[in-house]
Structures are given as C-alpha cells and as structure tokens.
C-alpha cells in the first residue's frame, strides 16, 4: 500500500513518483493499493494523470475524505482508514515526511505488526530542513523521528541524500532506488514542431525550457538572472517556463520585466502528457536550477526525451554530467548562465548529449526495473526482520 497525501499533479513530483512506482509493481502481478486524500477542485487533473499512465487501472486507489483543518493537523481520519486496511497489507510504503497522515499510517502499521518503508523525497536534506526549521525540529520530537527510525528502510533517491541525512541520526537502514520513466513515454516522442504550433509566439527560435513547479526552491530567480546574462550573446534565444504556480511566478515575472526581456520569456502554465513531451522535443536545452531535489522526475524525463540538460549541483543528479548528457553547475545565476552558454554554443550538443541522456535513462531508469528493485528490497529487509 503506497501512501501519499494526494494524486494532485499540482503538488509536484511526489504524487506522480508514488503512482508510477505503484503501477510498475502492479504490472509485475503484485496487489497494489494507494491511500490518498481527495482534493476538491483537482478531480479532472487526477483523472487525467491516471488516464495518462497505462496500467493505472490495476492499482486500487482508496480515497480519504478531503482534509479539513483538524485532519490536516492530526491525520486521524487517514489513520483510521489505514488501520482498517492493514490486515490485507504486506508492506506499507509512505511518501513524504511531514504530513500527519504518514505518522498515523506508520502507527497503524506498527500496531498491526506490518513493516513500512518511507521515501523522504529529499525532504530531510539540510536545505529542506532549514525551511521552517523550528517547526520541523518540533515535529521530529513529536513523532516524526520515531516514524523514521521505525521504518524497515528509508528509500533514498540519490547518493548525496544518504550522506546529507547522517546528522539526523536516523537508525533505520537505507537503500538507493531511483525514479524513472516508462520506455513507452520516450520511445515514440511527438514530431518536432508540435509544441511550437501550440505556442506560436515562440516561433522558430531556440528556447531554454524550465519544467517544474514555479516555487522558490526551484531557483527561478537564478534562471531569470542567467537568462539575462546569455540573452545578449544569443539574440534569438527564448525562455519557456512551464509548470503550476507554487508562489514564485510573480517575483520571476517581475525580475524578467526589470531586465527588459519579457518579450522573450513565455510562462505557459502546467504541461502534461503529449504537450509536455513535445516541449522537451522542441527545446534547445532543459534547465533546472533548483536549490534542492531528491531524484528529479523532470530531469529524468528531459534526458529520456533527448534534451541536453543544465542543472545545479543541488539537484544531486551527478549522472547528468557523468553520462555526458549535460552540465551540473554551481547554484548561482552565473553558474547557470555558464552552463547554458556551453550547450547553446555547441552545434552538436543536442545530438550528442541527447543520445547520452537517453541511453542512461533507458538502461538504468525505467519503472519496470525500479519497481522490481523496490520489491526486492522489501523482501530483503523483511527476511532480515524475520518476516
């Protein structure tokens, strides 16, 4: 049973990662359930996400009534539902850290004698812990640390994360399990020009693509500064920013306006399915200048689509540079600008780097491989615990 707050894609990558892992495991013949809250107003988006993932009908989705203020503070309702379901669960897989529902589900699992796994999705690294730091320290003392320690293992997304969480003194072991794509998602990509046809203002000009939530964590301030630095050397270059607004859109647009580049920057809202893939096909370079990532779905999808990538070292995705798929740069506007200029100034970057990224993703980061790996770790740790 995978447990995540919601399946609303506006919440970022965590719901999609949880759902795709669940679907991959169901495809291997396992009985898989998801426990999530309903999100009023997001029903159409959730249906679209489910419809866009082949095999999602094999996963039973158990909805808990939408959160009210009390439920958001306590998670009691989700805990009661989890307790009812736990007798039919071999392992619960929790996604996130700070949601009260997760503590309640972990408690229900312990009471029923069932093991649980927890994926923190990068929420325990120093940058994340520094946001609302006092609240998080209090939450650790009020049950979150016990939840973490009691996990059968922590499912971590990258090599850096294992080292970064050491100061927290978590006693649970950890395993590295990446995120991925379905081969079908990148095997037959849209023809070039589909995104441009849908967004004629972009025209035939080359463009940098940002594809993520418009949130402070994602480094849009660095991106605005970097674009201003390279715009003069690449006078036809445009910037396309795609994703739901997580609170940073206004500040980003103000920075772009102040630089006099509003006419070359296109904020297009969230992209899903084929039009997202079309944007990746048409872009000259994908850029994610994040302050922190666990294991970025956006980077993985970009490489799978054959995009050269410029990402910050804070994304903890060294495979981008190790594979020759792009550059991992310093967390600064100047660092991002340098990476973009290196790609844009290389006439063969799209072909060479794109091929390297696709090869990496198809060999290591596909959901069937990842789903089997997670189940193997469930079994390994279950045997170690005598289960």
Image: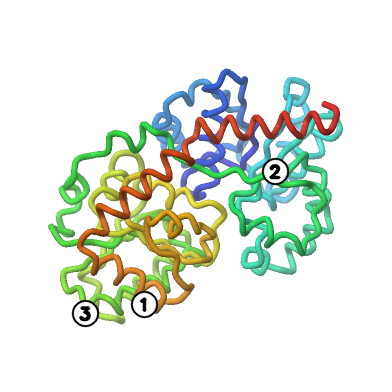
The x and y percentages for residue 333 are 41, 77
Q: CA distance from mark 2 to mark 1?
A: 37 Å
Local SS, label 3: loop
Which of the pair 160/36 is nearer the observer? 160
Residue 254 can be seen, yes or no = no
Lateral position of residue 84 relative to residue 320, left or right: right
The mark that comes first in sequence, 2 or 1, is 2
Q: CA distance from mark 1 to mark 3?
A: 12 Å
Residue, disc 3: 232
Q: What residue is shown at x 72% (from left), y 51% (from top)?
A: 73
Q: What residue is shown at x 13% (from left), y 58% (from top)?
A: 203
Q: How is the image coloured?
A: rainbow
In which image quadrant can residue 71 be found? top right
Residue, disc 1: 225
Local SS, label 2: strand
The x and y percentages for residue 131 are 64, 67
- Note whether 99 is above or below 260 in the view shown: above
- Note whether 337 is above or below 173 in the view shown: below
Return the mark for residue 118. 2
Lateral position of residue 165 relative to residue 321, left or right: right
Cβ atoms at labels 2 and 3 below 8 Å apart: no
């Amino acid at each position: 049973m995978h447990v995540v707050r919601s399946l609303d894609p506006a919440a970022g990558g965590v719901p999609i990662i949880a759902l795709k892992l669940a679907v991959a495991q169901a495809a291997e013949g396992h009985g898989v359930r998801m426990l999530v809250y309903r999100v009023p107003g997001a029903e159409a988006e959730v249906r679209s996400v489910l419809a866009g993932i082949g095999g999602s009908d094999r996963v039973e989705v158990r909805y808990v009534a939408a959160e009210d203020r009390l439920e958001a503070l306590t998670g009691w309702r989700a805990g009661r539902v989890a307790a009812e379901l736990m007798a039919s669960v071999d392992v619960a897989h929790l996604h996130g850290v700070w949601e009260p529902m997760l503590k309640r589900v972990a408690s229900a699992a312990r009471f029923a004698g069932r093991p649980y796994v927890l994926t923190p999705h990068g929420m325990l690294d120093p940058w994340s812990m520094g946001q609302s730091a006092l609240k998080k320290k209090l939450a650790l003392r009020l049950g979150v640390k016990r939840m973490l320690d009691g996990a059968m293992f922590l499912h971590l997304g990258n090599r850096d994360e294992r080292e970064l969480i050491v100061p927290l003194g978590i006693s649970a072991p950890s395993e590295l399990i990446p995120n991925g794509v379905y081969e079908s998602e990148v095997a037959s990509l849209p023809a070039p020009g589909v995104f441009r046809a849908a967004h004629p203002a972009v025209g035939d000009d080359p463009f940098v693509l940002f594809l993520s939530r418009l949130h402070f964590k994602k480094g849009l301030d660095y991106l605005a500064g970097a674009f201003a630095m390279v715009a003069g050397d690449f006078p036809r270059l445009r910037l396309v920013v795609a994703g739901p607004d997580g609170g940073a859109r206004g500040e980003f647009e103000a920075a772009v306006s102040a630089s006099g580049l509003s006419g070359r920057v296109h904020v297009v809202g969230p992209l899903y399915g084929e039009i997202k893939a079309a944007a990746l096909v048409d872009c000259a370079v994908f850029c994610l200048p994040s302050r922190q990532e666990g294991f970025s779905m956006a980077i993985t999808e970009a490489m799978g689509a054959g995009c050269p990538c410029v990402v910050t070292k804070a994304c903890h995705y060294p495979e981008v540079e190790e594979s020759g798929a792009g550059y991992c740069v310093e967390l600064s506007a100047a660092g991002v600008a340098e990476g973009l200029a290196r790609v844009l100034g290389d006439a063969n970057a799209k072909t060479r780097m794109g091929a390297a990224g696709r090869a990496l993703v198809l060999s290591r980061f596909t959901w069937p491989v990842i789903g089997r790996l997670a189940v193997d770790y469930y079994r390994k740790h279950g045997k170690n615990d005598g289960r």
